[in-house]
Amino acid sequence: MTAKKPVSRRSLKSDLSRVDAHKVKREEYEELPEFTEEMLARARINKGGRPVSSNPRKLISLRLPADVIERWKATGPGWQTRMAERLSRVR
């Protein structure tokens, strides 16, 4: 059983149905500026995402008894992180 997170209802405060219904007309294209070499030189690609970790996690397959997994899941969200922390302390 997975824990459900509360849904966040964010709004752009924009009439998206009106925006989606808009068809760009030929004369609107004339309002757009032409790209210059200077504009293209300043352009940067933003890949987004998370920063690269200095200690990345590795995906493995581990077989554990069902009752062990259920007990960890019962502790709530973040149970995998807590399990990893506990395992890293065992030496």
Image (cartoon, grey):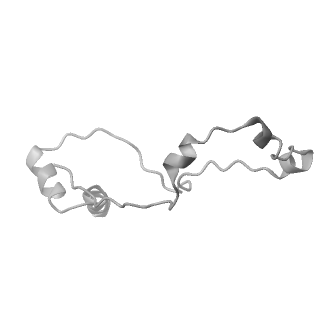
Question: For the point 26% across and 62% down, which residue is it?
Answer: 86
Q: Residue at 20% x, 39% y: name it.
A: 63
Percent of width and height locating residue 31: 81, 47
Residue 71, given in percent of the width and then of the height, sits at 12, 56
- The residue closer to the viewer here, 4 or 15, is 15
Residue 61 sits in quarter: top left
Q: Is residue 73 left or right of residue 6?
A: left
Viewport quadrant of the C terminus: bottom left
State the residue at coordinates (53%, 54%): 50
Percent coordinates x, y for residue 42 in the rendering: 83, 53
User: Which one is nearer the viewer's eye here, 56 or 89?
Assistant: 56
Residue 91 in sight: no
| Res 29 visible | yes
Q: Is residue 56 above or below residue 22?
A: below
Residue farthest to the left, as pictured = 67
Which residue in the rendered view is the most extreme toward the top?
Answer: 26
